[in-house]
């Protein structure tokens, strides 16, 4: 495998040594556009590191990966995608974390014949009417983990939830997903600004809402800020969230305020299957930290791609697409299949934040939804 990294931010953010080489005329070129600086950089770094770990383990000299930092800016993501497609002649795109960036990049890329493999963002538009035969989501459809949180809230006996999320595609999908499965009432539905850091007003609303539970989706630094402020506020209404707000990197920043919180995920480091055991061990050995949900998704995305490249080159689009659809790889989640809209069908778990030694982490305590696809597949016409 050869790697060409463009952009100082991507180089400085690297957690492990990388080899550099000129692009070569044969083989496959992969363009990775992800967030490596500014707010949310930890998510992109983890996706990149998981992806590149799988690539290093594969030892493929015929694959070049070009990594670019989108700085969480849609305009920059579009510019990078245009250059990767037109100047670098990439065969496959991947890496985008944020749904608003995915909506800016993916439809144009797939319309030009590119394959896009999503290691994270799964907006409802791309699962439903805007689906495309060359678009595959290896993580989830945006609603999924939130649907599982709604299902868990029912079993926990909650009947009146305060719900909040940022006002962007994934945030709107989050609250729609929670309400799709939650059988109780919604005390208030609140949308925050993307990137917001001060939640005093929202916490005051929660305090006065009469809710018996709080569901929130605030990924990256937003979740860190909210959790710290919520703990300091003295409000004791139980929290429920998706894994994005309780992932490995976030937990260390939040601290003990997160202990005991229940959250939902399609992956956890204690899933007992051979692929996951090996992944957790090798990731920690390579990078000196526990893997996150995002790292697991990057790892699976690379291994899906590699399994398809063992069968066909992306130039043979029909054969490569069929190989992707077969998903003939060992996922860290265990069983993995694609639905008709190229989104996963998978179990989604309930986790609890625990302390192991001096490290905060998550432990699986049950299954929230079994073999869950998504709510939009029947709108997809491929």
Image (cartoon, rainbow, N blue to C red):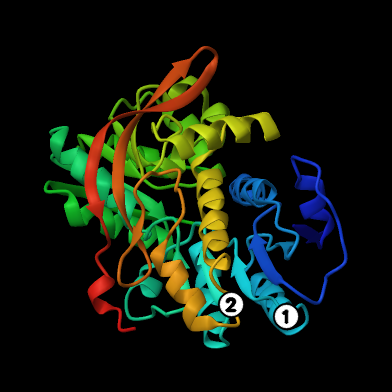
Left or right of 212? Residue 313 is right
Q: Quadrant of residue 169?
A: bottom left
Quarter holding the N terminus?
bottom right
The residue carrying pointer 1 sits among few (fewer than 14), some (14 to 19) or many (20 or more) residues within 10 Å by Cα, namely some
Left or right of 154? Residue 164 is right
Determine the residue positioned at 49% across, 32% down.
277
Could you tell me if residue 99 is visible in this image? yes
Q: Which residue is mark 1?
A: 89
Determine the residue positioned at 49% across, 42% down.
293
Q: Nearer the viewer, residue 118 or 328?
A: 328
Q: Quadrant of residue 340?
A: bottom left
Location of residue 15 with respect to 182 vertically, above or below: above
Report x, y in % for residue 183: 11, 48
Report x, y in % for residue 325: 40, 68
Q: Quadrant of residue 86?
A: bottom right
Determine the residue positioned at 27% across, 70% down.
376
Which circle marks residue 314 in the picture?
2
Location of residue 44 with respect to 238 vertically, above or below: below
Q: Nearer the viewer, residue 317 or 189?
A: 317
Left or right of 280? Residue 132 is left
Give the distance between the C-alpha atoms of the residues marked 2 and 1, in whole angstroms. 12 Å
Which circle marks residue 207 in the picture?
none
Location of residue 310 with respect to 110 vertically, above or below: above
Determine the residue positioned at 12% across, 46% down.
184
Which residue is situated farthest in the top direction here? 357
Report x, y in % for residue 161: 22, 43
Kindly state the secondary structure of the residue where label 2 is placed.
Answer: loop
């Amino acid at each position: 495998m050869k790697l060409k990294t463009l952009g100082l931010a991507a180089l400085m953010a690297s957690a492990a040594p990388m080899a550099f080489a000129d692009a070569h005329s044969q083989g496959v070129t992969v363009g990775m556009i992800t967030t490596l600086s500014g707010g949310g950089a930890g998510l992109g770094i983890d996706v990149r590191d998981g992806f590149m770990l799988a690539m290093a383990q594969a030892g493929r000299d015929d694959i070049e990966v070009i990594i670019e930092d989108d700085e969480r800016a849609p305009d920059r993501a579009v510019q990078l995608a245009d250059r990767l497609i037109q100047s670098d002649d990439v065969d496959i795109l991947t890496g985008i974390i944020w749904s608003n960036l995915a909506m800016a990049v993916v439809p144009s890329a797939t319309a030009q014949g590119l394959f896009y493999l999503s290691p994270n963002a799964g907006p409802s538009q791309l699962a439903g009417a805007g689906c495309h035969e060359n678009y595959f989501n290896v993580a989830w459809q945006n609603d999924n983990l939130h649907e599982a949180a709604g299902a868990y809230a029912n079993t926990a006996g909650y009947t009146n939830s305060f719900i909040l999320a940022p006002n962007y595609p994934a945030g709107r999908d989050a609250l729609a997903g929670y309400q799709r499965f939650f059988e109780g009432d919604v005390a208030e539905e609140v949308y925050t600004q993307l990137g917001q850091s001060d939640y005093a007003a929202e916490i005051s609303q929660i305090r006065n809402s009469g809710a018996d539970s709080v569901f929130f989706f605030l990924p990256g630094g937003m979740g860190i800020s909210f959790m710290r402020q919520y703990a300091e506020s003295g409000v004791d209404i139980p929290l429920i969230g998706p894994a994005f707000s309780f992932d490995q990197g976030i937990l260390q920043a939040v601290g003990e305020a997160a202990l005991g919180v229940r959250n939902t995920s399609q992956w956890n480091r204690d899933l007992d299957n051979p692929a996951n055991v090996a992944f957790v061990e090798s990731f920690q050995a390579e990078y000196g930290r526990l893997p996150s949900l995002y790292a697991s998704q990057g790892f699976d995305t690379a291994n899906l791609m590699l399994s398809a490249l063992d069968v066909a080159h992306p130039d043979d689009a029909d054969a490569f697409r069929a190989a992707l659809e077969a998903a003939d790889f060992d996922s860290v989640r265990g069983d993995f299949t694609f639905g008709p809209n190229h989104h996963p069908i998978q179990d989604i778990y309930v986790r609890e934040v625990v302390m192991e030694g001096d490290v905060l982490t998550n432990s699986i305590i049950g299954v929230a939804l079994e073999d869950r696809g998504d709510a939009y597949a029947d709108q997809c016409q491929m």
